[in-house]
Image (cartoon, grey):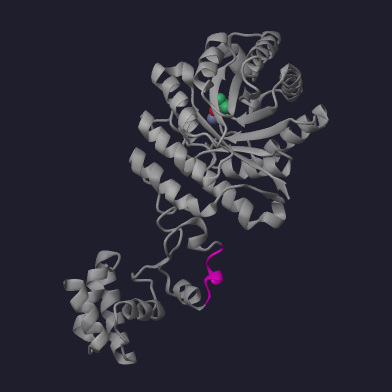
Protein backbone atom coordinates (compact mmCIF):
# COMPACT_ATOMS: atom_id res chain seq x y z
CA UNK A 1 0.00 0.00 0.00
CA UNK A 2 1.16 3.53 -0.75
CA UNK A 3 1.45 5.80 2.24
CA UNK A 4 -0.51 9.01 2.32
CA UNK A 5 0.64 12.00 4.34
CA UNK A 6 -1.76 13.90 6.56
CA UNK A 7 -0.96 17.62 6.70
CA UNK A 8 -2.88 19.13 9.57
CA UNK A 9 -3.78 22.81 9.29
CA UNK A 10 -6.02 23.10 12.37
CA UNK A 11 -3.61 25.65 13.85
CA UNK A 12 -3.52 27.77 10.69
CA UNK A 13 -6.53 27.47 8.34
CA UNK A 14 -8.68 26.31 11.27
CA UNK A 15 -7.43 28.81 13.77
CA UNK A 16 -7.88 31.77 11.41
CA UNK A 17 -11.64 31.25 11.13
CA UNK A 18 -14.18 33.03 13.38
CA UNK A 19 -14.52 31.63 16.88
CA UNK A 20 -11.49 29.34 16.72
CA UNK A 21 -8.55 31.51 17.68
CA UNK A 22 -6.11 30.01 20.18
CA UNK A 23 -3.42 31.49 22.34
CA UNK A 24 0.13 30.17 22.22
CA UNK A 25 -0.26 27.79 25.17
CA UNK A 26 -3.40 26.33 23.58
CA UNK A 27 -1.63 25.95 20.24
CA UNK A 28 1.20 24.06 21.90
CA UNK A 29 -1.23 21.80 23.73
CA UNK A 30 -3.05 21.03 20.46
CA UNK A 31 0.24 20.54 18.58
CA UNK A 32 1.39 17.95 21.13
CA UNK A 33 -1.90 16.11 20.73
CA UNK A 34 -1.62 16.26 16.92
CA UNK A 35 1.83 14.69 17.23
CA UNK A 36 0.33 11.94 19.40
CA UNK A 37 -2.38 11.46 16.79
CA UNK A 38 0.34 10.76 14.22
CA UNK A 39 -0.09 13.56 11.66
CA UNK A 40 2.79 13.95 9.20
CA UNK A 41 2.97 17.75 9.15
CA UNK A 42 1.62 20.41 11.52
CA UNK A 43 0.97 23.80 9.94
CA UNK A 44 1.42 26.01 12.98
CA UNK A 45 0.47 29.46 11.67
CA UNK A 46 0.93 32.40 9.32
CA UNK A 47 3.88 34.29 10.83
CA UNK A 48 3.47 37.56 8.90
CA UNK A 49 -0.07 37.94 10.35
CA UNK A 50 1.20 39.17 13.73
CA UNK A 51 4.15 38.99 16.10
CA UNK A 52 2.02 36.67 18.24
CA UNK A 53 1.53 34.26 15.32
CA UNK A 54 5.24 34.29 14.54
CA UNK A 55 6.14 33.57 18.17
CA UNK A 56 3.51 30.82 18.37
CA UNK A 57 5.00 29.06 15.34
CA UNK A 58 8.48 29.39 16.86
CA UNK A 59 7.31 27.91 20.15
CA UNK A 60 5.44 25.04 18.52
CA UNK A 61 8.59 24.34 16.47
CA UNK A 62 10.68 24.39 19.64
CA UNK A 63 8.36 22.15 21.64
CA UNK A 64 7.28 19.61 19.03
CA UNK A 65 10.38 18.01 17.60
CA UNK A 66 9.15 14.77 16.11
CA UNK A 67 6.76 16.13 13.46
CA UNK A 68 7.68 18.51 10.61
CA UNK A 69 6.34 22.02 11.28
CA UNK A 70 5.06 24.20 8.45
CA UNK A 71 4.59 27.97 8.31
CA UNK A 72 2.57 29.78 5.65
CA UNK A 73 3.74 32.76 3.58
CA UNK A 74 2.43 34.66 0.58
CA UNK A 75 4.86 34.85 -2.35
CA UNK A 76 6.37 38.08 -0.98
CA UNK A 77 9.78 38.58 0.52
CA UNK A 78 8.61 39.98 3.88
CA UNK A 79 6.15 37.10 4.30
CA UNK A 80 8.70 34.45 3.38
CA UNK A 81 11.29 36.04 5.67
CA UNK A 82 8.85 36.01 8.60
CA UNK A 83 8.10 32.33 7.99
CA UNK A 84 11.81 31.51 7.78
CA UNK A 85 12.40 33.29 11.09
CA UNK A 86 9.50 31.43 12.73
CA UNK A 87 10.76 28.07 11.49
CA UNK A 88 14.33 28.63 12.60
CA UNK A 89 14.10 26.35 15.72
CA UNK A 90 12.24 23.55 13.88
CA UNK A 91 13.83 20.11 13.66
CA UNK A 92 12.12 19.53 10.30
CA UNK A 93 10.87 22.85 8.89
CA UNK A 94 8.56 23.19 5.90
CA UNK A 95 8.08 26.55 4.22
CA UNK A 96 4.62 26.84 2.66
CA UNK A 97 4.44 29.55 0.01
CA UNK A 98 1.24 30.38 -1.82
CA UNK A 99 -0.01 32.61 -4.59
CA UNK A 100 -3.46 32.78 -6.17
CA UNK A 101 -3.42 31.60 -9.78
CA UNK A 102 -7.00 31.99 -11.04
CA UNK A 103 -7.55 34.91 -13.42
CA UNK A 104 -10.19 36.27 -11.04
CA UNK A 105 -7.79 36.45 -8.09
CA UNK A 106 -4.87 37.67 -10.21
CA UNK A 107 -6.92 40.53 -11.66
CA UNK A 108 -9.17 41.56 -8.77
CA UNK A 109 -7.10 40.77 -5.72
CA UNK A 110 -3.48 40.92 -6.81
CA UNK A 111 -3.54 43.14 -9.90
CA UNK A 112 -0.92 40.87 -11.45
CA UNK A 113 -0.47 39.37 -14.90
CA UNK A 114 0.10 35.65 -15.33
CA UNK A 115 3.74 36.36 -16.22
CA UNK A 116 4.24 38.37 -13.04
CA UNK A 117 2.69 35.53 -11.05
CA UNK A 118 5.08 32.98 -12.55
CA UNK A 119 8.00 35.27 -11.77
CA UNK A 120 6.92 35.77 -8.13
CA UNK A 121 6.41 32.03 -7.66
CA UNK A 122 9.84 31.14 -9.05
CA UNK A 123 11.76 33.84 -7.20
CA UNK A 124 10.10 33.28 -3.81
CA UNK A 125 10.52 29.50 -3.94
CA UNK A 126 14.20 29.95 -4.87
CA UNK A 127 14.64 32.43 -2.02
CA UNK A 128 12.90 30.08 0.41
CA UNK A 129 15.01 27.12 -0.66
CA UNK A 130 18.15 29.02 0.29
CA UNK A 131 17.00 28.85 3.91
CA UNK A 132 14.66 25.87 4.27
CA UNK A 133 15.17 22.40 2.81
CA UNK A 134 11.53 21.66 2.11
CA UNK A 135 9.27 24.09 0.27
CA UNK A 136 5.61 23.48 -0.51
CA UNK A 137 3.88 25.64 -3.07
CA UNK A 138 0.11 26.20 -3.10
CA UNK A 139 -1.71 27.59 -6.13
CA UNK A 140 -4.53 29.30 -4.29
CA UNK A 141 -7.89 28.93 -6.09
CA UNK A 142 -6.38 26.17 -8.25
CA UNK A 143 -9.88 24.72 -8.62
CA UNK A 144 -10.90 27.77 -10.68
CA UNK A 145 -7.59 28.26 -12.48
CA UNK A 146 -7.25 27.74 -16.22
CA UNK A 147 -5.83 24.21 -16.44
CA UNK A 148 -3.08 25.05 -18.96
CA UNK A 149 -1.86 27.93 -16.82
CA UNK A 150 -2.04 25.73 -13.72
CA UNK A 151 0.23 23.19 -15.43
CA UNK A 152 2.65 25.99 -16.24
CA UNK A 153 2.55 27.18 -12.60
CA UNK A 154 3.35 23.65 -11.40
CA UNK A 155 6.25 23.29 -13.85
CA UNK A 156 7.73 26.61 -12.68
CA UNK A 157 7.26 25.77 -8.99
CA UNK A 158 8.96 22.38 -9.35
CA UNK A 159 11.74 23.95 -11.43
CA UNK A 160 12.38 26.49 -8.66
CA UNK A 161 12.64 23.75 -6.01
CA UNK A 162 9.18 23.05 -4.56
CA UNK A 163 8.83 19.41 -3.56
CA UNK A 164 5.15 19.54 -2.58
CA UNK A 165 2.54 20.96 -4.96
CA UNK A 166 -0.75 21.77 -3.29
CA UNK A 167 -3.74 22.53 -5.53
CA UNK A 168 -6.51 23.85 -3.29
CA UNK A 169 -10.19 24.10 -3.96
CA UNK A 170 -10.05 27.34 -2.01
CA UNK A 171 -13.71 28.24 -2.35
CA UNK A 172 -15.22 24.76 -2.11
CA UNK A 173 -16.60 24.95 -5.65
CA UNK A 174 -15.30 21.71 -7.13
CA UNK A 175 -17.12 18.41 -7.42
CA UNK A 176 -15.18 15.15 -7.00
CA UNK A 177 -14.92 14.20 -10.71
CA UNK A 178 -13.58 17.64 -11.66
CA UNK A 179 -11.17 17.88 -8.77
CA UNK A 180 -9.74 14.42 -9.50
CA UNK A 181 -9.49 15.24 -13.23
CA UNK A 182 -7.48 18.38 -12.43
CA UNK A 183 -4.84 16.30 -10.64
CA UNK A 184 -4.76 13.67 -13.41
CA UNK A 185 -4.17 16.42 -15.96
CA UNK A 186 -1.36 18.00 -13.93
CA UNK A 187 0.28 14.62 -13.28
CA UNK A 188 0.20 13.78 -16.94
CA UNK A 189 1.68 17.16 -17.84
CA UNK A 190 4.48 16.93 -15.26
CA UNK A 191 5.22 13.28 -16.02
CA UNK A 192 5.28 12.33 -12.32
CA UNK A 193 8.58 14.00 -11.37
CA UNK A 194 10.58 12.08 -8.75
CA UNK A 195 10.47 13.53 -5.26
CA UNK A 196 7.42 15.73 -5.87
CA UNK A 197 4.23 15.08 -3.88
CA UNK A 198 0.85 16.31 -5.04
CA UNK A 199 -1.42 17.59 -2.30
CA UNK A 200 -5.14 18.32 -1.96
CA UNK A 201 -6.66 21.07 0.18
CA UNK A 202 -10.45 21.33 0.12
CA UNK A 203 -13.00 23.65 1.61
CA UNK A 204 -16.53 22.60 2.45
CA UNK A 205 -18.73 25.34 0.98
CA UNK A 206 -20.84 22.77 -0.90
CA UNK A 207 -20.32 20.04 1.69
CA UNK A 208 -17.90 18.14 -0.56
CA UNK A 209 -14.50 18.76 1.04
CA UNK A 210 -14.03 15.16 2.17
CA UNK A 211 -15.42 13.67 -1.06
CA UNK A 212 -13.16 15.93 -3.11
CA UNK A 213 -10.11 15.00 -1.01
CA UNK A 214 -10.86 11.30 -1.54
CA UNK A 215 -11.29 11.86 -5.29
CA UNK A 216 -7.85 13.47 -5.28
CA UNK A 217 -6.40 10.38 -3.60
CA UNK A 218 -7.82 8.25 -6.41
CA UNK A 219 -6.12 10.62 -8.86
CA UNK A 220 -2.70 10.02 -7.30
CA UNK A 221 -2.48 12.69 -4.61
CA UNK A 222 -0.38 11.56 -1.64
CA UNK A 223 -0.90 14.41 0.82
CA UNK A 224 -4.22 15.60 2.19
CA UNK A 225 -4.53 18.90 4.02
CA UNK A 226 -7.28 18.88 6.61
CA UNK A 227 -8.33 20.00 10.09
CA UNK A 228 -9.70 18.46 13.26
CA UNK A 229 -13.51 18.69 13.38
CA UNK A 230 -13.31 20.24 9.88
CA UNK A 231 -12.80 23.74 11.26
CA UNK A 232 -11.60 26.37 8.79
CA UNK A 233 -12.52 29.35 6.65
CA UNK A 234 -16.30 29.76 6.12
CA UNK A 235 -17.83 26.25 6.02
CA UNK A 236 -14.50 24.76 7.03
CA UNK A 237 -11.86 22.43 5.61
CA UNK A 238 -11.96 18.69 4.98
CA UNK A 239 -12.37 17.02 8.39
CA UNK A 240 -9.26 15.00 9.24
CA UNK A 241 -11.20 12.38 11.18
CA UNK A 242 -13.58 11.76 8.28
CA UNK A 243 -10.81 11.51 5.69
CA UNK A 244 -8.65 9.07 7.65
CA UNK A 245 -11.53 6.87 8.80
CA UNK A 246 -12.91 6.68 5.25
CA UNK A 247 -9.47 5.65 4.01
CA UNK A 248 -9.19 3.05 6.78
CA UNK A 249 -12.68 1.58 6.47
CA UNK A 250 -12.43 1.47 2.66
CA UNK A 251 -8.71 0.66 2.42
CA UNK A 252 -9.17 -2.01 -0.25
CA UNK A 253 -10.84 0.57 -2.41
CA UNK A 254 -8.29 3.38 -1.93
CA UNK A 255 -5.09 1.35 -1.53
CA UNK A 256 -3.35 3.87 0.73
CA UNK A 257 -2.50 3.91 4.41
CA UNK A 258 -1.91 6.77 6.84
CA UNK A 259 0.16 6.88 10.03
CA UNK A 260 -2.81 8.15 12.07
CA UNK A 261 -3.52 6.43 15.39
CA UNK A 262 -7.27 6.24 14.98
CA UNK A 263 -7.93 5.79 18.70
CA UNK A 264 -6.61 9.34 19.25
CA UNK A 265 -9.27 10.88 16.99
CA UNK A 266 -11.99 11.32 19.59
CA UNK A 267 -9.65 12.66 22.33
CA UNK A 268 -8.18 15.13 19.80
CA UNK A 269 -11.62 16.29 18.69
CA UNK A 270 -12.71 16.77 22.31
CA UNK A 271 -9.54 18.68 23.17
CA UNK A 272 -10.17 21.12 20.31
CA UNK A 273 -13.78 21.63 21.42
CA UNK A 274 -12.67 22.20 24.97
CA UNK A 275 -10.02 24.75 23.94
CA UNK A 276 -12.21 26.68 21.49
CA UNK A 277 -15.56 26.22 23.22
CA UNK A 278 -17.07 25.05 19.91
CA UNK A 279 -18.76 21.68 20.27
CA UNK A 280 -19.30 19.56 17.18
CA UNK A 281 -22.82 18.86 15.91
CA UNK A 282 -24.28 15.70 17.52
CA UNK A 283 -24.66 14.04 14.12
CA UNK A 284 -21.09 14.83 13.00
CA UNK A 285 -19.46 11.77 11.41
CA UNK A 286 -16.92 9.86 13.54
CA UNK A 287 -16.75 12.23 16.53
CA UNK A 288 -20.30 13.55 17.07
CA UNK A 289 -22.18 12.60 20.25
CA UNK A 290 -24.64 10.53 18.20
CA UNK A 291 -22.06 8.83 15.97
CA UNK A 292 -22.31 5.68 18.10
CA UNK A 293 -25.69 6.20 19.77
CA UNK A 294 -28.68 4.08 18.85
CA UNK A 295 -32.26 4.85 19.79
CA UNK A 296 -34.47 3.05 17.27
CA UNK A 297 -35.62 -0.28 18.70
CA UNK A 298 -34.79 -2.19 15.50
CA UNK A 299 -31.27 -0.76 15.48
CA UNK A 300 -30.75 -1.43 19.19
CA UNK A 301 -31.84 -5.01 18.73
CA UNK A 302 -29.41 -5.45 15.81
CA UNK A 303 -26.52 -3.84 17.70
CA UNK A 304 -27.10 -6.09 20.73
CA UNK A 305 -27.05 -9.17 18.47
CA UNK A 306 -24.03 -8.02 16.41
CA UNK A 307 -22.67 -4.46 16.19
CA UNK A 308 -21.81 -4.95 12.51
CA UNK A 309 -25.53 -4.70 11.73
CA UNK A 310 -25.54 -0.92 12.21
CA UNK A 311 -21.93 0.15 12.80
CA UNK A 312 -19.20 0.20 10.15
CA UNK A 313 -16.60 1.35 12.69
CA UNK A 314 -16.50 0.38 16.34
CA UNK A 315 -16.51 3.26 18.85
CA UNK A 316 -13.27 1.92 20.40
CA UNK A 317 -11.49 2.14 17.01
CA UNK A 318 -11.73 5.93 17.06
CA UNK A 319 -11.31 6.32 20.82
CA UNK A 320 -14.97 6.77 21.79
CA UNK A 321 -15.29 5.20 25.25
CA UNK A 322 -18.50 3.23 24.51
CA UNK A 323 -21.54 3.12 22.29
CA UNK A 324 -24.75 4.25 23.92
CA UNK A 325 -28.18 2.75 23.64
CA UNK A 326 -30.41 5.76 24.15
CA UNK A 327 -33.69 5.21 25.94
CA UNK A 328 -36.39 7.17 24.18
CA UNK A 329 -39.75 6.62 22.58
CA UNK A 330 -38.15 4.71 19.70
CA UNK A 331 -36.09 2.31 21.75
CA UNK A 332 -36.83 -1.36 22.18
CA UNK A 333 -37.21 -3.89 24.98
CA UNK A 334 -33.84 -5.57 24.43
CA UNK A 335 -31.97 -2.32 25.04
CA UNK A 336 -34.15 -1.63 28.06
CA UNK A 337 -33.41 -5.05 29.54
CA UNK A 338 -29.66 -4.41 29.08
CA UNK A 339 -29.89 -0.98 30.74
CA UNK A 340 -31.79 -2.51 33.68
CA UNK A 341 -29.19 -5.25 33.95
CA UNK A 342 -26.48 -2.54 34.17
CA UNK A 343 -28.42 -1.17 37.15
CA UNK A 344 -28.49 -4.61 38.75
CA UNK A 345 -32.11 -5.54 37.92
CA UNK A 346 -33.25 -8.84 36.43
CA UNK A 347 -36.90 -8.03 35.55
CA UNK A 348 -39.45 -10.75 34.83
CA UNK A 349 -41.18 -10.44 31.44
CA UNK A 350 -44.19 -8.81 33.12
CA UNK A 351 -41.99 -6.29 34.97
CA UNK A 352 -40.09 -5.49 31.81
CA UNK A 353 -43.37 -4.83 29.99
CA UNK A 354 -44.47 -2.42 32.72
CA UNK A 355 -41.13 -0.61 32.84
CA UNK A 356 -41.28 -0.35 29.04
CA UNK A 357 -44.79 1.13 29.19
CA UNK A 358 -43.71 3.75 31.72
CA UNK A 359 -40.45 4.57 29.92
CA UNK A 360 -42.16 5.17 26.56
CA UNK A 361 -44.89 7.24 28.24
CA UNK A 362 -42.22 9.40 29.86
CA UNK A 363 -40.25 9.65 26.61
CA UNK A 364 -43.37 11.00 24.91
CA UNK A 365 -43.28 13.90 27.35
CA UNK A 366 -39.57 14.65 27.66
CA UNK A 367 -37.73 13.39 24.52
CA UNK A 368 -35.32 11.05 26.27
CA UNK A 369 -35.22 9.16 29.51
CA UNK A 370 -32.38 10.01 31.85
CA UNK A 371 -30.49 7.61 34.08
CA UNK A 372 -32.25 8.82 37.21
CA UNK A 373 -35.70 8.38 35.56
CA UNK A 374 -34.93 4.77 34.79
CA UNK A 375 -33.67 4.16 38.31
CA UNK A 376 -36.91 5.60 39.73
CA UNK A 377 -39.17 3.56 37.42
CA UNK A 378 -37.22 0.35 38.02
CA UNK A 379 -37.42 0.97 41.74
CA UNK A 380 -41.21 1.32 41.59
CA UNK A 381 -41.87 -1.62 39.30
CA UNK A 382 -39.35 -4.36 39.82
CA UNK A 383 -39.26 -6.69 42.76
CA UNK A 384 -35.72 -6.05 43.87
CA UNK A 385 -33.17 -8.81 44.30
CA UNK A 386 -30.02 -8.50 46.40
CA UNK A 387 -27.94 -7.19 43.48
CA UNK A 388 -30.30 -4.30 42.85
CA UNK A 389 -30.46 -3.34 46.50
CA UNK A 390 -26.64 -3.29 46.65
CA UNK A 391 -26.41 -1.25 43.44
CA UNK A 392 -28.96 1.22 44.73
CA UNK A 393 -27.19 1.56 48.07
CA UNK A 394 -23.90 2.21 46.29
CA UNK A 395 -25.47 4.88 44.02
CA UNK A 396 -27.04 6.78 46.93
CA UNK A 397 -23.94 6.48 49.20
O1 LIG B 1 -7.63 27.49 0.86
C1 LIG B 1 -6.50 27.81 0.44
O2 LIG B 1 -6.28 28.02 -0.76
C2 LIG B 1 -5.44 27.93 1.42
C3 LIG B 1 -4.06 28.12 0.89
C4 LIG B 1 -3.42 29.30 1.50
C5 LIG B 1 -3.25 26.87 1.08
O3 LIG B 1 -5.67 27.82 2.60
ZN1 LIG C 1 -7.60 26.83 2.93
Report the front residue among 193 and 379.
193
Q: Locate ligand 2 by image quadrant.
A: top right
Q: How many numbered circles are shown? A: 0
In the picture, measured across the screen, residue 255 lies left or right of residue 350, that is right
Report the front residue among 139 and 44.
44
In the picture, measured across the screen, residue 302 lies left or right of residue 289, that is right
Identified at 76% across, 21% down, the residue is 155
Identified at 29% across, 64% down, the residue is 367
The spot of residue 231 in percent (x, y) is: 46, 38
Which image quadrant for residue 251?
bottom right
The spot of residue 15 in percent (x, y) is: 43, 31
Whether residue 308 appears in magenta in the rendering, the answer is yes
Which image quadrant for residue 226?
top right
First to last magenta residue range: 306-312
- Examine the rendered structure and indicate whether residue 149 appears above or below residue 32: above
Q: Is residue 307 visible?
A: yes
The spot of residue 14 in percent (x, y) is: 46, 33
Whether residue 164 appears in magenta in the rendering, the answer is no
- Examine the rendered structure and indicate whether residue 376 appears above or below residue 144: below
Amino acid sequence: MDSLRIFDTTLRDGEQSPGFSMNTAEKIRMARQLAKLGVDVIEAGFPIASRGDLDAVRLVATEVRDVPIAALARARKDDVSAAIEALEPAAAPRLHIFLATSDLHLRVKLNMSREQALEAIASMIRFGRQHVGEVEFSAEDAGRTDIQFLCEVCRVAVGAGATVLNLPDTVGYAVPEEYGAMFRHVREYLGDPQGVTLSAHCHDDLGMAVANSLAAVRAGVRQIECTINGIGERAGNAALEEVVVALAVRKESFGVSTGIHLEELFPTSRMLSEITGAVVAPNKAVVGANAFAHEAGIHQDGIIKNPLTYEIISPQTVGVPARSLVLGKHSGRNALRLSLRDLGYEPSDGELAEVYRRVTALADQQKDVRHRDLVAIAHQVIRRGAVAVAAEAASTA
